[in-house]
Image (tube, grey):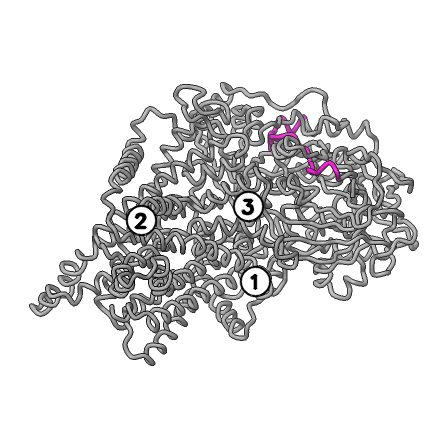
């Protein structure tokens, strides 16, 4: 998913302008598609809220109150207008402002995504460096096979197994739920750990393989060979000369993974009953809570765009190898 | 990303290919096997494995044959996975090559569309789609296929760009070859191997995504026996009859692992310096 | 039906020793659904114990409450509720000196205000139909006279189940939207802190009308969507009580892991509903064929392991239970005959089962499809619907052939009337039988037990013959709890009364 690697840079200024136009077009297209999609969903949010006993008059009154009865383009433009002034509207279900609702849920998803990336890096960096340094060795073979196996575990399987082993059987971690940071860091981490590990299972191999490949390539380069002939200790060479050039692609990939987790934690959040964005999406879609769904789509799209911009920046400005390609 | 084509991985590769081959044969020939229908009752609910002869995997919570459902499920999981991958690979491949060849405005438009697909929260899209169109194999193939167009398009674009400047393409252009000829005879063939080998890896991902959707209750509707649906249904009886979850889980894991193993082997052979398109 | 104000504990669970109010005693109760629409009693929508209604009694208390098992109405903040001989004029007496937590009095005017607000079309209350054409008059500070449009000797049950929570008129008048988020009632607890979809913390109301209650200092509601996880939360000590939902297998699982369950068996329960207003199930033979093809014992076992099918519309402990089972027995041969008959008439039976996505109903639909697939001249498909689609398609548009709903029947009033009367609110089957209507009206219009028994026996006879519905599993409302928690009393469809909850060893 490394977008930047494929873009062909030409004139720098024109490029940024084009890039900005591109991103704006992406955002417009995404929100328009989301609005159209929700518009196609059968039933009105009013019916979902008022329930089966509602009379047609009640439904019509509520449709008018929230503006569901206006034509689609009008509603979309109105919504874009609100977006520009920072107003995402109100949730149909709860009547709360969408922005507030999302911000209330964001820390949970943000925290487990960050933790998952952290855990992945913690595992991937030492294993990646060592297995890359001893290609074909016993450790490398175990790590490579292990990475393939981890990659093949669907996240819901990982979650169920973790709950069974580390929560139900041993009772070390809570089965589900969430403790906010205000309940104390230790308590918070106890709740966040299993969901983060479940997410990390699938992402660790991505980082590990990237790093291992990079290490293998770097070790073949001249400056490393020179360092080795100068008699520097191998461990020093590995972390000083080899890990350094790999840090950038690694961080970039970690950012991509992070973005992916922000948008893709629905399964884990539903399994662990976390009050995050995924849970919000799962309950808003069947309820046809259009303002909330739209708000989530925008948030995910913006995250994607920002992550990609950073990736672009990283590759084109800092990494000499990409420029050479 | 495996920079070392593993010759030693021979056994694993053979095992993986063997499993996929067996699964493919079972899926194709499921009608010929002496199995009960996947929705027919064969006994009481939750019969343990190996309790009675033909039902060596026992029965599920409804009293249907787990063995039959597992094999019929293979057919559905493979159909969804391979169908969606093919759709994504063909569409993505075409778009990617076109973007590389046409450049300019067309490239920008294609780029915006691809980025928009990537920027759309995937599960949100699939959940919403499940509410709009009645879910089924066809709709799932179409929506998963569309969702996974961008990575293929990027791969194909990179491959096409690399070939555009090669001598034989330049020569063909100089000899007055038309657009069609250049696209279909010179550029496309070069893009097929990387796209095809990547497709095998993507097929593995598709199986997991289908499982996740069924787990959330928006995959293939019952009574069709997809693996994901079997896991989701068995989850309710995890303490009582864990095999109802473990058997389809194992099948899914082995299949995903096999697709990954084969796919990576192919990628390592096709393009030893394989990019990081994932 | 006169109640004395003496404390009464006709709960479904023996109360045992009343624990002392421990300083700082706190209990957590896990529910399944967030009160998404806020906590305004006028928008009380979800009566199931895992939803909205199970929070409201903590904040608003109850005027009256009905026993989940028997439907018997008991006093709460209200002292008595009596009908005149015709069952048209009801007199509600309130206790002296009850105040809301904002200091304003909970008097007859306050109750009148709440009820008139529910009846007002502008409020868009789902409860409005219950008060259609009803008038109220506060004849004294503690006395409210309620005049019904038609005789109803069971109106006290309507009040106890649907109209029992009263909010502060002052707070509601000030800002109804804010009131839903920050409710003011006269219940045992007050809302302190609410993190949506996570938890709601409530603190003891020191001014609660009953001396010495509530027993707990802090009550926390937690929301966990997955029923198994709700039980796990109690098993692991994170919570003291949980409402896992309607599946009885969860109750067995909880008891298996050393937890207790407060139960209230009743009548009714989850039932298949046939759309009798549309083909193919407007034909009695089609309904009979499906019902006779089923082994209801196995069905109950499959959809909810460890459970049994009901043998009557009424619970085994109900005075209306006929004593012997009246539900049709499986007769596959007869079912096949009926199907062949339908096919010979050129209309082979073919239909779609429309079901909600929960595990219970999903298994029900898969079981039906699986078993019915063994018969000839019958084709069955399944359609799984999310709740919004179910509301729209099945309950509002009635565009379905076979679906399901859960109707707990403690007393036949009011739920059986709503289900089977041709104008009933939950009669999604479009079922119309003048004899059933007459019998239901007779039951409603009578305060004599013998006459009622006769009327409801007639209702059951007709329903078993017509088969607009088929109850598929016995109804038991329950709450899972740790053995430290005591005083669990179930009211309504199985909600808790929070003022008597106590924690031992704290």
Q: Quadrant of residue B256?
A: top left
Task: Give the residue at x 32% y 69%.
Answer: A319
Q: Give the x, y percent position of residue B176.
A: 8, 68
Magenta region: which residues?
Answer: C461-484
Q: Count residues near mark 3 (Cα–Cα under 10 Å), then give few for <14, some for 14-19, many for 20+.
A: many
Separation of residues labelled 2 and 3 (CA atoms) = 38 Å
Can see residue B247?
A: yes
What is the chain identity of the residue bearing mark 1?
A
Mark 3 vs 1: CB contact within 8 A: no
Mark 2 vs 3: CB contact within 8 A: no
Mark 1 vs 2: CB contact within 8 A: no
Q: Count residues near mark 2 (Cα–Cα under 10 Å), then give few for <14, some for 14-19, many for 20+.
A: many
What is the chain identity of the residue bearing mark 3?
C
Can see residue C155?
A: no
Q: Report the side of B190 relative to C147 (left or right).
A: left
Q: Give the x, y percent position of residue A42.
A: 50, 53
Circle 1: element type: helix
Label disc, if present, on residue A102 of the rendered structure: 1
Q: Which residue is mark 3?
A: C390
Label disc, if present, on residue B201 of the rendered structure: 2
Q: Nearer the viewer, mark 1 or mark 2?
A: 2
Q: Count residues near mark 1 (Cα–Cα under 10 Å), then give few for <14, some for 14-19, many for 20+.
A: some
Q: Report the side of C156 relative to B249 (left or right).
A: right
Separation of residues labelled 1 and 2 (CA atoms) = 35 Å
- Check chain identity for marks 2 and 3: say if they share one: no
Residue C430: within the magenta? Answer: no
Task: Give the residue at x 41% y 61%.
Answer: A256
Depth check, front residue: B8 or C503: B8
Up-down: is C490 above or below C33? above
Task: Give the residue at x 55% y 21%.
Answer: C330
């Amino acid at each position: 998913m490394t977008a930047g690697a494929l873009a062909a840079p030409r004139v720098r200024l024109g490029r940024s302008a084009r890039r900005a136009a591109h991103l704006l077009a992406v955002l417009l297209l995404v929100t328009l598609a989301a609005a159209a999609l929700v518009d196609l969903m059968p039933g009105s949010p009013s019916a979902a809220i008022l329930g089966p006993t509602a009379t047609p008059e009640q439904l019509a009154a509520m449709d008018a109150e929230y503006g569901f009865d206006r034509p689609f383009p009008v509603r979309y433009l109105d919504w874009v207008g609100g977006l520009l002034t920072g107003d995402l509207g109100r949730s149909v279900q709860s009547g709360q402002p969408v922005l507030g609702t999302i911000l209330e849920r964001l820390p949970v998803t943000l925290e487990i995504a960050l933790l998952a990336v952290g855990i992945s890096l913690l595992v991937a960096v030492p294993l990646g460096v060592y297995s890359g340094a001893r290609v074909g060795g016993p450790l490398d073979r175990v790590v490579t096979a292990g990475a393939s196996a981890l990659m093949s575990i669907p996240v819901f399987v990982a979650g169920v197994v973790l709950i069974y082993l580390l929560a139900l059987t041993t009772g070390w971690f809570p089965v589900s739920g969430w403790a906010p940071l205000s309940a104390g860091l230790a308590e918070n981490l106890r709740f966040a750990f299993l969901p983060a590990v479940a997410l990390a299972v699938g992402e660790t191999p991505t980082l590990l393989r990237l790093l291992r490949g990079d290490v293998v390539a770097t070790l073949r380069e001249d400056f490393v060979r020179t360092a080795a002939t100068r008699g520097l200790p191998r461990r020093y060479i590995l972390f000083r000369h080899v890990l350094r050039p790999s840090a950038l692609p690694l961080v970039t990939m970690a950012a991509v993974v992070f973005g992916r987790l922000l948008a893709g934690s629905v399964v884990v959040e539903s399994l662990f009953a976390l009050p995050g964005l995924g849970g919000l999406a799962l309950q808003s879609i069947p309820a046809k809570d259009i303002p909330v769904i739209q708000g989530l789509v925008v948030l995910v799209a913006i995250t994607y765009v920002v992550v990609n911009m950073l990736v672009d920046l990283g590759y084109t400005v800092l990494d000499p190898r990409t420029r050479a390609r | 990303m495996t920079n070392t084509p593993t010759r030693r991985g021979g056994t694993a590769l053979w095992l993986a290919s063997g499993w996929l081959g067996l699964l493919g044969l079972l899926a194709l020939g499921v009608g010929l096997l002496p199995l009960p229908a996947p929705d027919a009752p064969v006994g009481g609910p939750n019969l343990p494995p190996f309790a009675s002869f033909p039902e060596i995997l026992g029965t599920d919570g409804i009293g249907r044959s787990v063995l039959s459902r597992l094999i019929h499920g293979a057919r559905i999981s493979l159909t969804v996975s391979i169908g969606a991958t093919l759709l994504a690979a063909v569409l993505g491949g075409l778009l990617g090559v076109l973007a590389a060849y046409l450049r300019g405005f067309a490239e920008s438009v294609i780029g915006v569309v691809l980025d928009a697909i990537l920027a759309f929260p995937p599960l949100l899209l699939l959940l919403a789609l499940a509410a709009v169109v009645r879910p089924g194999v066809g709709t799932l193939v179409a929506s998963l296929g569309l969702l996974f167009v961008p990575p293929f398009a990027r791969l194909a674009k990179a491959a096409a760009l690399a070939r555009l400047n090669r001598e034989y393409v330049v020569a063909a252009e100089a000899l007055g070859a038309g657009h069609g000829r250049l696209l279909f005879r010179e550029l496309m063939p070069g893009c097929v191997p990387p796209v095809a080998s990547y497709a095998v890896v993507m097929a593995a991902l598709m199986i997991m995504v289908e499982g996740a959707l069924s787990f959330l209750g928006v995959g293939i509707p019952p009574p069709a026996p997809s693996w994901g649906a079997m896991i989701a249904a068995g989850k309710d009886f995890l303490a009582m009859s864990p095999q109802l979850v473990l058997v389809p889980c194992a099948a899914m894991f082995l299949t995903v692992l096999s697709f990954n193993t084969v796919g990576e082997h192919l990628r390592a052979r096709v393009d030893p310096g394989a990019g990081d398109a994932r | 039906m006169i109640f004395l104000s003496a404390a009464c504990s006709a709960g479904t669970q023996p109360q045992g020793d009343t624990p002392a109010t421990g300083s700082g005693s706190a209990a957590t109760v896990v529910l399944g659904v967030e009160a998404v629409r806020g906590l305004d009693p006028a928008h009380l929508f979800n009566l199931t114990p895992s939803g909205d209604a199970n929070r409201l009694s903590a904040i608003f208390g109850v005027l009256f409450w009905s026993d989940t098992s028997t439907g018997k109405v008991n006093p709460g903040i209200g002292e008595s509720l009596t009908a005149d001989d015709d069952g048209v004029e009801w007199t509600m007496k309130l206790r002296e000196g009850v105040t809301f937590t904002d200091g304003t009095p909970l008097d007859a005017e306050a109750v009148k205000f709440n009820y008139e607000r529910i009846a007002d079309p502008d409020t868009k209350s789902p409860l409005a139909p219950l008060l259609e054409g009803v008038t109220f008059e506060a004849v004294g500070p503690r006395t409210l006279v309620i005049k019904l449009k038609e005789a109803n000797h069971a109106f006290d049950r309507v009040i106890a189940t649907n109209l029992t929570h009263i909010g502060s008129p002052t707070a509601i008048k000030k800002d109804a939207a804010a009131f839903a988020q920050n409710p003011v009632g006269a219940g045992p607890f007050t809302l302190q802190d609410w993190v949506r979809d996570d938890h709601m913390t409530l603190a003891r109301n020191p001014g609660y009308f009953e001396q010495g209650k509530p027993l707990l200092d802090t009550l926390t509601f937690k929301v966990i969507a997955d029923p198994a996880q709700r039980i796990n939360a109690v098993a692991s000590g994170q919570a003291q009580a949980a409402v896992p939902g309607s599946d009885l297998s969860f109750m067995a699982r909880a008891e298996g892991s050393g937890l207790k369950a407060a139960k209230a068996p009743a009548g009714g329960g989850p039932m298949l509903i046939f759309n009798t207003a549309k083909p193919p199930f407007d034909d009695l033979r089609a309904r009979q064929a499906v019902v006779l093809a089923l082994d209801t014992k196995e069905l109950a076992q499959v959809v909810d392991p460890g459970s049994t099918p009901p043998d009557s519309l009424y619970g085994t402990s109900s005075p209306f239970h006929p004593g012997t089972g009246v539900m049709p027995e499986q007769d596959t041969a007869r079912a096949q005959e009926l199907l062949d008959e339908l096919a010979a008439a050129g209309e082979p039976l073919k239909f779609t089962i429309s079901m909600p996505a929960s595990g219970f109903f999903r298994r029900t639909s898969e079981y039906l499809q699986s078993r019915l697939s063994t018969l000839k001249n019958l084709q069955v498909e399944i359609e799984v619907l999310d709740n919004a689609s179910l509301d729209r398609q099945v309950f509002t548009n009635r565009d379905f052939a076979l679906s399901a709903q859960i109707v707990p029947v403690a007393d036949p009033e009011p739920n059986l009337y709503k289900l089977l009367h041709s104008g009933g609110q939950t009669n999604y089957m479009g079922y119309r039988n003048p004899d059933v209507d007459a019998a239901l009206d007779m039951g409603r219009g009578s305060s004599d037990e013998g006459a009622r028994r006769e009327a409801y026996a007639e209702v059951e006879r007709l329903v078993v013959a017509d088969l607009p519905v088929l109850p598929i599993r016995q109804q038991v409302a329950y709450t899972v709890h740790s053995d430290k928690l005591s005083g669990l009393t179930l009211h309504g469809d199985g909600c808790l009364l929070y003022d008597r909850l106590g924690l031992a060893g704290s």
